[in-house]
Amino acid sequence: MIQIKTIEEYHLAYQKSKNNPNEFWEEIASEFVWKSKWTQVMEYDFLKGHSVWFKDAQLNITENCIDRHLAHNGTKIAIVWEPNNPSESGISLTYNELSLKVNQAAAILKKNGVKKGDRVCLYMGMIPELSIAMLACARIGAIHSVIFGGFSAQSIADRLIDAQASVIITCDGAFRGDKVIPLKSVVDDALNTYQLIDKVIVVARTHTPVSMIKGRDIWWKDELQELEKEGILFVEPEPMDAEDPLFILYTSGSTGKPKGVVHSSAGYMVWAHYTFVNVFQYESQYKHFCTADIGWITGHSYIVYGPLSAGATTVIFEGVPTWPDAGRLWDVVDKYQIDILYTAPTAIRTLMGAGLSFFSDKNLNSLKILGSVGEPINEEAWHWLDTHIGKGRCPIVDTWWQTETGGILISNLAGVTPSKPSFATIPLPGIFPILLDENGHEITEANITGHLYIKQSWPGIIRTTYNNHHRCVEAYFSTHKGYYFTGDGSFRDENGNYRITGRVDDVLNVSGHRIGTAELENAINSHAGVIESAVVAFPHAIKGQGIYAFVVVEDSQFTQEHSPLDIVATVSRLIGPIAKPDKIQIVKALPKTRSGKIMRRILRKIAEGELDSIGDTSTLLDPKVVEEIIQNVV
Ligand code: PRX
């Protein structure tokens, strides 16, 4: 485990990653188990959106996340699973047990015809079988595509069609607080649209009644029983080329359709591992608790692949921070004596609002490192976390990164490099950020905000968007040629600390979840009677950003039977409950320029309540439209 332990070592590592990247990465990569070594450390061409790391090497990530730990750490706990309901017992799996389960799951997939390169979709709750299924796919070289449980049948169908998946693994249902989400039934609806699925493998969790279609739907436990009869305990790990895809994860961008971000086998592994051990200053006895859902990139990199590659004990929590009460997260910390807690500002703000009584009787003394991810953390939340949870003795890492980056790019290293509230601070070794102005000129001055780009490739960078490389080049490598465009704005202080100010494209960040405005508008416009719409963000005390939709409807619509709530229902059906607008304002018209372009800037100001800074409206086709909207703000 190559770890930076002092600020001097950080500067040396950063310089080396700049001046001698081949040697720098070779040393880090040499710690892993390879089936054959690389012929070249890296090659990249940002003009073509092309990156290759550890060229020609072969490996299997599961040998690095599981097999290599068995000799010395086989009896160490790999996964701690804490169920939704505190009265139900949790489960702990040692590395030996995880190995057996992953091998068995790999055998189930093989028996059901899954081969290297096939796409397997996982639509499951937060149970150990989800990470077991991911690792089982990786073991046999199948590409997993995890879909978050808050997405609708239509969203699943869109992803299945794009990935041309052949197998789905799901659950009968998922527990989330006091709700049961009928996952299998949502999958069934998706399969009315996409019919090329060979098998649906169902894990029993909630015992919700489910329909099981003969020849297509099978129970995970029945498959396991058969394997046990046959005594299959081991599946040979498939040799994977370094650049073979490990997984696809769909994410929203500024266009209407989510993109299938593809990550590689070797580079992603090296990056998830290196960032995990350095940012969190992981030590072998630490228990790591990341509260994200595995359906997002944070769960992939910092519940599953990063921690397991380091031989860590990682917690999977099925529940939500506020159920049965706002002390639930602190229960988990206390129960397992957690060392590293990695969570999101939205969760911190929610728990902050609940008051101090929820953790006054909890022992949080085991905590050593706190982390934040997904959205800017406001100073108030940062200080609350520092004072009340970290008791002033736990470094807080504010980690900035994206689905496309595979792992953390900008963050302080816990207790090694300084933190600064609301700043992600400095780049990791191998990351060379640059701020450009709107015209693509580099901003070299301090204390100025610009658009954040990255100059050079790093091991965990997005390799392509599934089945459509052109889209990848367009979205990430075309805004200013030769740079990776993050879609974020950033301020940089005189010490080179970055403070991410939020998206500069048409992407919202609601509770740390990315949602494209174009995707939302498409869904709203599909609702009967809607003529057109424009969606913008407004500041939300808990979620960071809320969704504000301005909607033009046909006159005859929206009587009592047709209310804005119906629009919410349509969005929920087409995208999923996570994308429900918080506010819908029915308007007569949208503010447009004479050429027909919607002036979102004006709508944003209205949604933010900043009526004084709306600016000049004289270029609008009809300036009166703005007055009408302001008068009826919701
Ligand atoms: O806007 C940034 C914000 O989340 C976006 C990436 O979203 P996603 O791909 O869903 O991944 C989230 C988890 C890595 C970024 O473009 N973001 C992420 N982390 C931070 C952040 N904004 C400010 N500070 C952060 N630490």
Image (tube, helix red, strand yellow):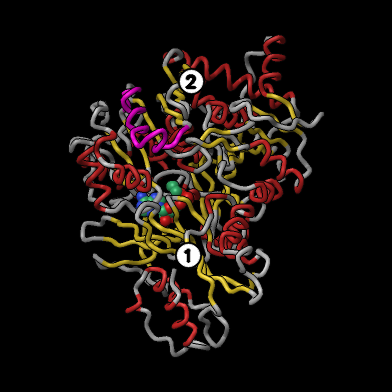
Q: Position of residue 222 (x, y in %)?
A: 70, 18
The picture quadrant where one finds residue 105 is: top right
Q: Which residues are magenta?
A: 319-338
Q: Amino acid at mark 2?
A: Arg
- To which residue does mark 1 refer? 548
Q: Against 366, is 119 above or below?
A: below
Is the residue indicated by label 2 positioned so its CB lies within 8 Å of ligand 1?
no
Q: Position of residue 141 (x, y in %)?
A: 64, 32
- To which residue does mark 2 refer? 68
Q: Against 608, is 354 above or below?
A: above
Helix, strand or loop under label 1: strand
Q: Earlier in the sequence, mark 2 or mark 1?
A: 2
Q: Can residue 223 be seen?
A: yes
* The N terminus: image quadrant: top left
The picture quadrant where one finds residue 313 is: top left
* The C terminus: image quadrant: bottom left
Q: Position of residue 450 (x, y in %)?
A: 35, 67
